[in-house]
Amino acid sequence: MRITLSASTIVVVWGLLYFRVGPVPTWFYVFAWYPTLILLDAIASRPEGRPSLFADRRLAVSLFAWSPVIWLVFEAANLRLHNWYYVSLPALQWERWSGILLSFATVVPALLLAERVFDSAGACKRWRTRPIAIRPWELRTAVGLGLGIGALALLRPVVFFPLIWGSVFLIADPFVYRRIPQLSLIRDVERGEWGRIGRLMLGGIGIGLIWETYNYWADGHWIYTVPWLEQTKLFEMPPLGFVGFPFLALEAWSMYAALCALGVAIPVSGMARVAPKRLAVAGTAALAFVVVTLSTMERYTISSTVPRLAELPGITPRQVEIMRGAEIRSLNHLARIDWRRLVAATELDSTTATRMVETARLVTLRGIGNEHARKLLQLGVDDVCILATRDGAQLAHALRDELSPVRPTTAETRVWVRSAKRACGQEGPT
């Protein structure tokens, strides 16, 4: 029953996205992921009547509450790495932050459920080797290595950015090994049991594919600007970037296990208890971290919000009424219409209609948004094909001002120019 219901819900959400029924296009990632979690949980629970991961409400709350905190660690790192940014998010800050937290709350549950799905299918059950003795100095070395490669990634992100995916695991798991060895992946290696590691890594790849699929079709989504790898992408992700997802799965497991070892999270296996005083302190610290990181993301990582028709640069209130009278209620709709049809459907002259359609296409190109488009128009970039002729680095410098000294970044304007070239038939797919 749960499989049928959750799968049907996912199909309905895709249908609502296709027909552009609000607010699904903006919130598609959230609407799609939660029934996907239920579907994965139902699949993982089928064999032998295994209990649902969410049967224990305390565990479910713990997973969904700590998941955003865990992912925001990587968002904090991205403030230095500049490997991705967000576009077309909700305009209201409370709605934007709610959407971000609801999205990030799916990360850890999704990865744990993927491992359970593979476990229920018997995957990696025979991945065994001889036991490997783990000595204390090797644990210390792992922590030092994790700190070292993490520092390299942050100090020289253009060269060493991939090292962030794995560094946190090396720091967190030795701590778990000492406190709750049953949850430690290093302990699995010591025992010669590689199955859980294999399932987590396989699950990371699978979940990564789902993440990128949902992200690609959502209006509110992230765009990668990974050094050397911007030209070719599968969905929004450079193909080599998918290598990071298995390591993210290991990190997510170990980070959540470390919280369990601290007594502030509920372990999946139920082997430890939460210490209320520690949880209060950790919760307060986590809340402060979330607020600070989200506030910083507003400045450095969130590039644009949902573009509204009434805020289209140069549009008048009367023209907004004309658009709505012609059943054109969104910039995406306006950007897709031919100016001749717009003239036929309204009282606008051809010059005004052409200008409005071209401006809408500029605003909606790769999440540029109304604010960036307004600045582009001031520079004489009033349509997509003119944007295609510009140099990304020079354009970024010209667009930044005292009110926005960091946005747009050079990486963002490169994305815009490359996409404009593609739209105008000057370059292959990005």
Image (cartoon, helix red, strand yellow):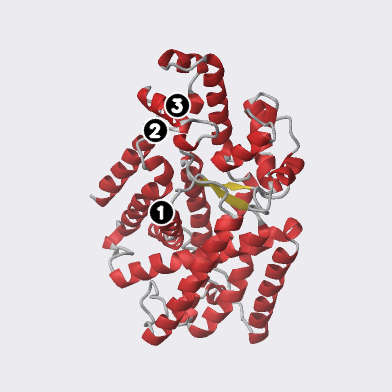
Residue 145 in the image: x percent, y percent? Answer: 69, 74
Q: Position of residue 107 (x, y in %)?
A: 46, 59
Count all numbered tags in the image, as a single digit: 3
Instruction: Tell me which numbered mark, 3 or 1, is placed earlier along the sequence.
Output: 1
Residue 23 found in image quarter: top left
Vertical arrangement, residue 359 with respect to residue 173, above or below: above
Q: Nearer the viewer, residue 127 or 305?
A: 305
What is the spatial separation of the Cα atoms under label 1 and label 2, in whole angstroms?
A: 23 Å
From the viewer's side, name the closer residue of 316 and 356.
Answer: 316
Q: Nearer the viewer, mark 1 or mark 2?
A: 1
Task: Please give the residue where the numbered disc 3 appears in the rendered image.
Answer: 319
Verify CB contact (< 8 Å) between mark 2 and mark 3: no
Give me the C-alpha separation between circle 2 and circle 3: 27 Å
Q: Amino acid at mark 1?
A: Glu
Q: Residues within 10 Å of mark 2 (few under 14, many from 20)?
A: few
* Amino acid residing under circle 3: Gln
Residue 149 image position (x, y, % from top left): 70, 68
Instruction: Name the disc covering residue 95, or none.
Output: 1
Q: What whole-number distance in Å separates the C-alpha atoms at marks 3 and 1?
A: 28 Å
| First of labels 2, 3 by sequence position | 2
Label whose residue precedes the other's in the sequence (1 or 2): 2
Q: Is residue 197 visible?
A: no
Q: Residues within 10 Å of mark 1 (few under 14, many from 20)?
A: few
* Residue for point 53% across, 30% down: 360
Indicate the quadrant where residue 372 lies.
Answer: top right
| Left or right placement of residue 365 versus residue 30 in this view | right
Give the label, 3 or 1, closer to the camera.
3
Residue 355 is situated, as x and y percent measured from the top left of the image, at 57, 23
Nearest the viewer among 132 and 152 is 152
Q: Give the quarter of the figure containing the C terminus.
A: top right
Left or right of 280: which side holds 408? right
Say which residue appears at 53% left-offset and 25% top-offset: 356
